[in-house]
Image: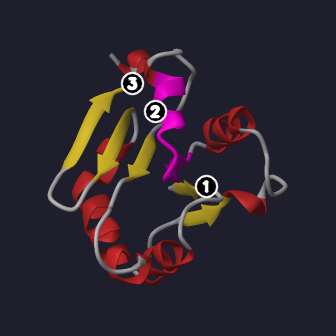
């Protein structure tokens, strides 16, 4: 189960839903522009891994020790828009499977880098 942060591109959300992922936009639960701390807390409360483009969430968890179910950070740069990148995100999430829980993962074009959450060690 995933929670898409406000900065998650709409084509990514659409692709994940089309492929059967259980993903909900954060704005289903919080008002637009909600503070990152509230977004992270809502993800934890709902038991949903947060999908975001904001590296700050990884920093909040790894460096500051904030609690989380898991975070997936999208770092797909280069040519093409998010419609073209959405398939890569879906494939990477399928590859992660249940391992998305308990870690911070960064999806790039050629790799998925993951680090266990401090609380999951």
Q: Nearer the viewer, residue 108 or 1?
A: 108
In the figure, is residue 45 to the left or right of 109? right
Q: CA distance from mark 3 to mark 1?
A: 19 Å
| Magenta residues (range) | 48-61
Query: Of the numbered discs in the image, which one, if any, rests on residue 61?
Result: none
In the figure, is residue 5 to the left or right of 71? right
Which residue corresponds to the image point at 45% horizontal and 38% vertical from the top-left?
70
Q: Is residue 36 magenta?
A: no
Between label 3 and label 2, give the one nearer the viewer: 2
Mark 1: secondary structure: loop
Looking at the image, residue 80 lies above or below residue 51: below
Rendering coords of residue 84 (x, y %): 33, 82
Q: Kindly identify which residue carries mark 3.
A: 117
Decide which of tag 2 and tag 1 comes sooner along the chain: 1
Q: Kindly identify which residue carries mark 1.
A: 5
Image marks 2 and 1: residues in contact by CB distance under 8 Å: no
Looking at the image, residue 63 lies above or below residue 2: above
Q: Kindly identify which residue carries mark 2.
A: 58
Which residue corresponds to the image point at 61% horizontal and 55% vertical from the top-left?
5
Q: Quadrant of residue 38?
A: top right
Q: Nearer the viewer, residue 13 or 85?
A: 85
Mark 3: secondary structure: loop
For disc 3, the neighbor class at 10 Å (few under 14, some 14 to 19, many from 20) is: many
């Amino acid at each position: 189960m995933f929670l898409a942060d406000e900065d998650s591109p709409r084509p990514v959300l659409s692709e994940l839903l089309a492929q059967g992922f259980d993903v909900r936009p954060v704005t289903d639960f919080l008002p637009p522009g909600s503070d990152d701390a509230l977004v992270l807390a809502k993800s934890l409360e709902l038991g949903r891994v947060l999908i975001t483009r904001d590296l700050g969430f990884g920093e909040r968890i790894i460096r500051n020790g904030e609690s989380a179910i898991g975070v997936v950070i999208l770092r797909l740069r280069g040519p093409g828009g998010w419609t073209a990148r959405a398939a890569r995100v879906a494939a990477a999430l399928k590859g992660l499977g249940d391992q998305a829980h308990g870690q911070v993962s960064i999806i790039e074009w050629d790799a998925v880098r993951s680090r266990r959450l401090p609380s999951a060690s």
